[in-house]
């Protein structure tokens, strides 16, 4: 019985194994038949169609905007230097970095003791010289009167001599009397000569006294100038910078103590390439006084001021290229010397050109034009200007009104069929969908206001405008973003 049971179990297992192998063979055969059937059918390749955003080429007259970067500087800057050496006795209020002073205002006074003493000595010497001059004038006057008296006496002696000679000729007088008269006349003429010599000496002393008086006056003027130089005054109204003096400190002669900047006479210096400079010139080769816009970016709040192109640099500095131009600011509110600004200048208008996105051009200045059956074709254009994210090109006449691909990609090329995506009037763009203003919660608003109030680099008028905008219910997004980027949040 045991042998019979084991034989039946073995037979069952053999039958099950054979059944499974038959099932597996059938499955493999069925799969092979399906594969052979598929290989016998023809294969059709489908063309791949890409989607591409397109825009229409429109010929128009465009005015290129030349954009450059420069810095603000003052056309009147004065280095304030100590006019004399000594101790700073008086320092005016407002003599500090950023302090505003008026024209002629007293900035500092150096100890004037020595200068005042020298002035007093010079004044005393002047009075002494004036007295000496007065004495010399009196001496000249007396010497002149003495000469006149001597001449009168000589004339009297001459008349006496003539009378004695007449008496001698008539036989009344004597020769001794004539000789005595002649001797008296000679003595009188000798006295006249002595008096004239004394007059000449008196006049020489008068001239010397006059020269001495002039020297004393010059010395007094120099002493008064030295005394006046103990005071430093502002030559024009402006703002102080680089102040390095304190009350009670010692300064040397000609030591720089501050810099005076005229905040109302500002200009912008900016550099352009030689080709850009050539496009700005008039027909006669001169630089026009064109209008310029100067933009200062202050935490998202742009300060725009008009300016006028005034001149160009006379030489190209070593290691530099292009041309350095200067524009005078017509409005200086919110601007300070040293600000880094953006300068925008209009170039001459260009006619029959097209404005396209910069991404529509490749490295060889070619565009992809939408042709028949929405297949792309390449067209050559001439790049004239780059204006931010756009370009100004001159295209063939047949491209007027044609559609070109806005953004090129490696998968797009000539002969590729695309599905054009045209801007629809019912679809909102991303810029339109994004909100321009947001509502701030109290904590966020308080943080922004506190940061603006404690920022010392902002001009007062800009700070006031930003605070007003932050206190409104709806705040511009770009201002909030810019302030938070400066906060590090």
Image: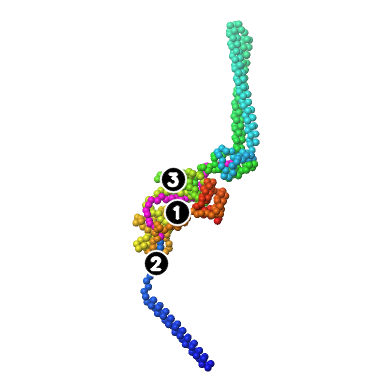
Asked whether the residues under the numbered discs 2 and 1 touch, taking CB atoms below 8 Å apart as contact, a structural biologist would say no
Q: Which residues are magenta?
A: 53-81
Q: Is residue 58 magenta?
A: yes
Asked whether, in this view, residue 108 is left or right of residue 426, the answer is right
Mark 3 / mark 1, whichever is N-terminal: 3
Task: Give 130 or 149, whichever is nearer the viewer.
Answer: 130
The mark lying in front, picked from 3 and 1, is 1
Q: Is residue 144 above or below residue 341?
A: above
Task: Give 127 or 243, whichever is nearer the viewer.
Answer: 243
Task: Give 43 or 277, whichever is nearer the viewer.
Answer: 43
- Circle 3 is placed at which residue position? 290
Secondary element at image label 1: loop
Residue 379: image x %, image y %? 37, 59
Mark 2 / mark 1, whichever is N-terminal: 2
- Circle 1 is placed at which residue position? 388
- Circle 2 is placed at which residue position? 48
Q: How far apart are the two marked residues, 3 and 1, measured between alpha carbons?
A: 22 Å
Asked whether, in this view, residue 302 is left or right of residue 207, the answer is left
Secondary element at image label 2: loop
The residue under the point 50% across, 52% down is: 474
């Amino acid at each position: 019985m045991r042998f019979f049971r084991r034989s039946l179990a073995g037979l069952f297992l053999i039958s099950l194994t054979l059944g499974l192998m038959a099932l597996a063979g059938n499955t493999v055969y069925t799969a092979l038949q399906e594969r052979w059937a598929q290989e016998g059918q023809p294969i059709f390749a489908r063309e791949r169609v890409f989607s591409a955003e397109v825009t229409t080429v429109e010929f128009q007259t465009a005015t290129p905007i030349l954009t450059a970067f420069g810095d603000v500087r003052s056309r009147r800057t004065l280095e304030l230097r100590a006019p004399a050496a000594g101790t700073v006795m008086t320092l005016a209020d407002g003599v500090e970095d950023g302090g505003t002073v008026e024209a002629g205002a007293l900035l500092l006074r150096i100890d004037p003791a020595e200068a005042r003493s020298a002035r007093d000595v010079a004044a005393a010497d002047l009075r002494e010289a004036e007295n000496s001059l007065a004495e010399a004038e009196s001496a000249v006057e007396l010497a002149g009167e003495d000469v006149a008296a001597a001449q009168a006496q000589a004339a009297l002696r001459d008349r006496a001599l003539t009378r004695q000679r007449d008496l001698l000729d008539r036989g009344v007088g004597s020769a001794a009397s004539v000789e005595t008269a002649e001797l008296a006349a000679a003595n009188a003429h000798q006295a006249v000569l002595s008096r004239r010599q004394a007059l000449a000496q008196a006049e020489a002393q008068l001239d010397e006294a006059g020269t001495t008086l002039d020297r004393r006056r010059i010395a007094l003027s120099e002493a008064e100038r030295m005394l006046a130089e103990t005071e430093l005054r502002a030559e024009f109204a402006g703002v102080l910078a680089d102040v390095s003096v304190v009350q009670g400190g010692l300064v040397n002669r000609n030591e720089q103590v501050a810099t005076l900047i005229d905040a109302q006479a500002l200009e912008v210096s900016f550099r352009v390439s030689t080709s850009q400079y050539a496009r700005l010139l008039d027909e006669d080769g001169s630089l026009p006084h064109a209008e310029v816009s100067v933009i200062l970016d202050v935490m998202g709040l742009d300060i725009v001021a008009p300016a006028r192109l005034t001149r160009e640099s006379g030489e190209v500095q070593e290691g530099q290229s292009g041309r350095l131009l200067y524009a005078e600011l017509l409005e200086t509110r919110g601007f300070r010397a040293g600000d880094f600004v953006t300068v925008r200048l209009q170039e001459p208008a260009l006619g029959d050109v097209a404005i396209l996105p910069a991404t529509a051009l490749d490295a060889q200045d070619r565009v992809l034009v939408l042709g028949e059956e929405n297949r792309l074709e390449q067209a050559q254009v001439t790049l004239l200007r780059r204006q931010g994210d756009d370009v100004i090109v001159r295209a063939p006449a047949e491209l007027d009104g044609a559609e070109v691909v806005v953004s090129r990609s490696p998968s797009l090329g000539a002969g590729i069929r695309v599905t054009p995506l045209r801007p629809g009037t019912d679809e909102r763009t991303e810029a339109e969908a994004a909100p321009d203003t947001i509502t701030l919660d109290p904590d966020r608003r308080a943080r922004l206001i506190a940061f603006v109030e404690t920022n010392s680099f902002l001009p007062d008028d800009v700070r006031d405008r930003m605070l007003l905008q932050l206190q409104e219910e709806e705040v511009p997004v770009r201002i909030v973003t810019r302030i938070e980027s400066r906060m590090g949040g």
